[in-house]
Image: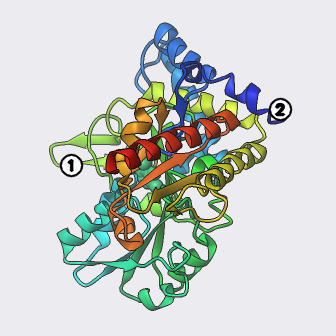
């Protein structure tokens, strides 16, 4: 493992040679050169696809594709690579659980408990399932610390609860709820737990066995990998009892006009020609990540967010929605609309996000119509923080002149 050096790390990201200041890594991370090279080599040199042909190139590709499951299993400390299902990303992984596991078991009157801090991806699939069966989605509210209130959870769980849906890390506040406690409480009433790892995976990959997680989803594009690929982890017995959601080639062992016999997991959930380039790219990103001191890299991102919070805190009306020492910093300024600021920041070459961050219930709970959000990655540096502070100073100045 190489010691973490911010400028050496930064040099591996060609997108940063463009003059802009990239502070939107919670939306998607930039890609290191090795991932770009792998994608290029894949399309330049590889032939055939996976699981379909006997010739050498296709067989090698199948091996590479299957071995990448073991890499993800290592990342999450899953017992076996066969517990990793390739999906289009977090959204598709959660929809797969909603359709393949929950829906066939869900009955009228059943309940699904969902934290108020969730991204729409970990709320809407449960609303859809509940609507289809006459079941109910129960809100697990956030507390004064902006985390789902663990003290309230026991009163929301009951024998009617089929599933608890909770994010590992909020894409707005950066807050990480106490997963171990939430999972133990849900298991206590016989419910399963879906953990949305879209944000958490890049910062703190979980030990799915130690935490006793039932289902865990993440997207490669937030972990330095390609878009259009992600994974679902599931406990082996849950994947075994899960029904295929999409039908098509290679998800079955036999088919005639009377029906079909599905493959075992994970292949029965991967109908059609898969995103082989995506899997190969994710595999490259994981091999690259394994060479870095991720803890030090994470501490650096958090330090930058703390510095930004401190510097922006000097401006009048600054309000931070950050939880703990997260690398994500959502904020606004009292009396100033976030979209006015973000437009002026874009003009100054600062890439960040403003709005509701696909978390409308959380925005309502925070009592805001939207926020600005900067999110740091280990390739950011002190100059990025200073550029942000200067640009916000200019934006606030221009807006106050307009008002005067
Ligand atoms: N959950 C969270 C917390 C997220 O931040 C995101 C991405 N913004 C998603 C789910 C959805 O991920 P994807 O769009 O890659 O499916």
- For disc 1, the neighbor class at 10 Å (few under 14, some 14 to 19, many from 20) is few
Q: Residue drawn 64% across and 65% down?
A: 324
The location of residue 192, given as percent across then percent down, is: 47, 72
Label 2 SS:
loop
Q: Quadrant of residue 364?
A: bottom left
Image spot of residue 169 (x, y percent): 55, 59
Q: How many labels does the image show?
A: 2
| Distance between mark 1 and mark 2 Cα atoms | 53 Å
Q: Is residue 268 visible?
A: no
Q: In terms of depth relative to the viewer, which is nearer, 170 or 364? A: 364
Q: Which residue lies furthest to the top in this view?
A: 44
The quarter of the picture where residue 30 lies is: top right
The residue at 41%/30% (across/down) is 347
1 or 2: mark nearer the eye: 2
Q: Where is residue 25 in the image (x, y as percent from the top left)?
A: 53, 40
Q: Please tell me which residue is depicted at 57% across the width and 34% down the height of the picture.
A: 224
Q: Is residue 373 left or right of residue 224?
A: left
| Drawn side of residue 193 relative to residue 312, left or right | left
Q: Which is nearer the eye, 37 or 391? A: 391
Q: Mark 1 points at which residue?
A: 259
Q: Does the residue labelled 1 lie within 8 Å of ligand 1?
A: no
Residue 152 in view (yes/no): yes
Element on which disc 1 rests: strand
Q: In the image, is residue 162 above or below residue 158?
A: above
Reading the image, the residue beneath label 2 is 2
Quadrant in which residue 157 is drawn: bottom left
**Looking at the image, is mark 1 or mark 2 earlier in the sequence?**
2
Q: Residue furthest front?
A: 404
Q: Do the residues labelled 1 and 2 touch (CB within 8 Å)?
A: no
């Amino acid at each position: 493992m190489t010691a973490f050096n911010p400028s050496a790390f930064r040099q591996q990201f060609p997108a940063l040679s463009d003059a802009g200041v990239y502070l939107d890594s919670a939306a998607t991370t930039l890609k290191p050169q090795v991932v770009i090279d792998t994608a290029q080599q894949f399309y330049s040199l590889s032939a055939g696809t996976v699981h379909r042909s006997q010739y050498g190139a296709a067989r090698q590709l199948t091996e590479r594709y299957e071995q990448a499951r073991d890499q993800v299993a290592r990342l999450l400390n899953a017992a076996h690579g066969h517990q990793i299902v390739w999906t289009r990303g977090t959204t598709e992984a959660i929809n797969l659980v909603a359709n393949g596991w929950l829906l066939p078991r869900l009955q009228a009157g059943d309940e699904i408990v969902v934290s108020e801090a969730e991204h729409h991806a970990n709320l809407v699939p449960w609303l859809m399932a509940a609507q289809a069966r006459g079941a109910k989605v129960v809100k697990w509210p956030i507390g004064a610390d902006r985390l789902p209130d663990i003290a309230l959870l026991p009163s929301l769980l009951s024998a009617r609860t089929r599933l608890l849906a909770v994010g590992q890390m909020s894409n707005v506040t950066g807050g990480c709820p106490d997963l171990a406690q939430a999972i133990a409480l849900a298991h206590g009433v016989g419910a399963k737990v879906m953990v949305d790892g879209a944000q958490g995976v890049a910062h703190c990959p979980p030990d799915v066995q130690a935490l006793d997680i039932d289902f865990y989803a993440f997207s490669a594009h937030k972990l330095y990998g390609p878009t259009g690929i992600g994974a679902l982890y599931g406990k082996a017995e849950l994947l075994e009892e899960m029904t295929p959601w999409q039908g098509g080639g290679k998800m079955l062992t036999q088919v005639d006009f009377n029906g079909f016999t599905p493959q075992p997991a994970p292949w029965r959930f991967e109908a059609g020609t898969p995103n082989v380039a995506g899997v190969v790219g994710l595999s490259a990103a994981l091999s690259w990540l394994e060479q870095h001191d991720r803890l030090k890299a994470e501490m650096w991102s958090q330090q930058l967010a703390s510095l930004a919070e401190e510097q922006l805190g000097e401006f009048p009306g600054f309000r931070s929605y950050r939880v703990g020492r997260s690398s994500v910093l959502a904020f606004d300024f009292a009396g100033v609309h976030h979209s006015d600021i973000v437009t002026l920041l874009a003009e100054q070459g600062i890439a960040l996000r403003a709005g509701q961050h696909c978390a409308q219930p959380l925005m309502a709970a925070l009592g805001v119509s939207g926020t600005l959000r900067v999110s740091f990655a280990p390739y950011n540096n002190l100059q990025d923080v200073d550029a942000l502070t200067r640009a916000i100073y200019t934006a606030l100045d221009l807006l106050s002149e307009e008002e005067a």
